[in-house]
């Protein structure tokens, strides 16, 4: 236990200290936390085997999944709070159109490119692997995007649309992956599982939205019994923890395997809560302050989980570079086309696609499922490589795009210590 506590402390301190360096380089703090994770991971300081000095093995980092899952739940809950009726009325239909269209275009483009690679080099990349990679390409990481928005206090039409699209992207990505995985399984095993391809993905989305709506309503109801700000913040945190726990449950209804999407459940909880609670904005400000250390741990541990062995595998690097280029083009041109169709402003058309590049937890979860297919190890390694690239450069590109759109106001260096002394 003491080793784990020392490791967690090292994560937070290392991430914060490195963020001072990235600030000098005009890079987002998220990048510092991920790099700190790489340094503390099993391929750098952790390899020394000193207890408490980083993570000595990938198994040790995976044992911290309760921390990363909890942090992801709070991140999704925060994004859900952006779905206020006033914003949905203003851009709801546009966000849905853009969220669906850019994800589908990205999947189709990556599928086409990788299927061509398969036809040219069938011994390098199998057809099922190419199809699954195309679906995983649709997923966007909400965590890195939200952290950049929060750090620089970004605000404006692009920021509001971005948070809505990122949330919608998760549901679309889940459906696309389930369909593609079913097709890939059929190609590998010679039979089509209708339950796995169509019914189970829809059931998961419906159950997730239903559970999230119930938890959001219950949170608002329980909040009414408390008047102290600290107690209301505590009950809000407790409910998010409860929601994260419930979203991990799995069960069967007849032959149908049922489960929940943690991101969808927590997003829906936040959406319902913010629209029926009059003081939700005040509460969210307090919860955000409480969850900051948790978010730092999330990114540092995520960095430590990245397997650097993929960097010495030529096949993985080759397919990975092709995947990254195709996905980046799909996100950029898919967003640009959908933004023009919905008549968005030029700054949004030019910059939204770049802000959708970060990819992490959701994609890794899909890749883990895909690894059960024949040749699935290559899929997992390609996604590990792409996540390493996207997570290191994605936040910086998101920051640059928000600056270009005029939604981040760069300020001079300030010190909270000096402000508090006044």
Image (cartoon, helix red, strand yellow):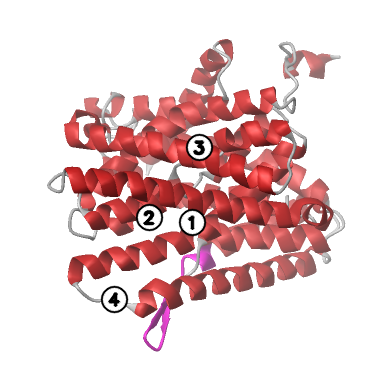
Identify the disc placed on residue 357. 3
Q: Position of residue 324 (x, y in %)?
A: 38, 36
Residue at image point 40% right, 89% down: 254
347 left or right of 388 in image:
right
Residue 114 magenta: no
Measuring from the top left, give residue 376's x and y in whole percent: 23, 53
> What stretch of residues is rendered in magenta?
245-258
Give the mark toward the camera: 2 or 3: 3
The residue that mark 4 highlights is 192
Q: Dot 2: what SS?
A: helix
Q: Quadrant of the C terminus?
A: top right
Q: Which mark is residue 366?
A: 2
Circles 1 and 2: CB atoms closer than 8 Å:
yes
At x 26% / y 53%, what residue is drawn?
Answer: 129
Q: Is residue 206 above or below residue 43?
A: below
**Which numbered disc, 4 or 3, marks the residue that appears first in the sequence?**
4
Is residue 359 positioned above or below 92 on the image?
above
10 Å crowding of disc 2: few (<14), some (14-19), many (20+)? many
| Earlier-in-chain disc, 3 versus 1 | 1
Q: Which residue is mark 1?
A: 173
x and y percentages locating residue 79 in the rendered image: 66, 49
The verdict on residue 252 being magenta is: yes
């Amino acid at each position: 236990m003491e080793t784990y506590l020392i490791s967690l402390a090292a994560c937070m301190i290392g991430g914060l200290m490195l963020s001072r360096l990235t600030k000098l380089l005009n890079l987002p703090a998220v990048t510092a936390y991920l790099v700190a994770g790489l340094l503390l991971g099993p391929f750098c300081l952790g390899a020394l085997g000193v207890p408490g000095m980083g993570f000595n093995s990938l198994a040790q980092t995976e044992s911290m999944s309760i921390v990363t899952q909890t942090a992801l739940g709070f991140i999704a809950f925060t994004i859900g709070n952006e779905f206020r009726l006033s914003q949905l009325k203003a851009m709801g239909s546009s966000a849905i159109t853009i969220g669906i269209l850019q994800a589908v275009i990205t999947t189709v483009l990556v599928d086409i490119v990788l299927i061509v690679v398969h036809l040219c080099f069938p011994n390098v990349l199998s057809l099922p692997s190419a199809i699954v990679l195309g679906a995983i390409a649709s997923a966007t990481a909400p965590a890195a995007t939200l952290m950049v928005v929060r750090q620089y206090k970004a605000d404006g039409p692009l920021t509001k649309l971005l948070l809505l699209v990122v949330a919608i992207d998760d549901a679309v990505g889940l459906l696309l992956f389930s369909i593609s995985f079913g097709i890939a399984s059929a190609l590998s095993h010679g039979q089509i599982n209708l339950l796995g391809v169509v019914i189970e993905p829809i059931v998961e989305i419906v159950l997730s939205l239903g559970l999230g709506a119930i938890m959001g309503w219950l949170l608002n109801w329980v909040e009414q019994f408390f008047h102290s700000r600290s107690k209301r913040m505590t009950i809000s945190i407790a409910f998010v923890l409860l929601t994260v726990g419930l979203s991990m449950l799995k069960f069967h209804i007849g032959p149908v395997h049922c489960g929940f999407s943690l991101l969808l459940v927590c997003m829906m909880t936040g959406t319902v809560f913010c629209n029926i609670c009059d003081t939700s904005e005040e509460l969210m400000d307090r919860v955000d302050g409480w969850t900051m250390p948790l978010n730092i741990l999330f990114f540092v541990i995520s960095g430590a989980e990245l397997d650097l062995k993929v960097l010495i595998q030529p096949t993985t690097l080759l397919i990975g570079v092709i995947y990254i280029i195709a996905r980046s083009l799909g996100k950029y041109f898919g967003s640009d086309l959908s933004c023009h169709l919905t008549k968005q402003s030029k700054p949004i058309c030019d910059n939204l696609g770049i802000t959708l590049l970060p990819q992490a937890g959701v994609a890794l979860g899909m890749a883990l499922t895909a690894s059960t297919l024949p040749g699935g190890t290559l899929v997992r390694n390609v996604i590990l490589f792409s996540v390493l690239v996207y997570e290191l450069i994605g936040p910086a590109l998101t920051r640059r795009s928000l600056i270009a759109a005029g939604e981040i106001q760069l300020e001079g260096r300030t010190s909270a210590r000096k402000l508090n002394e006044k």
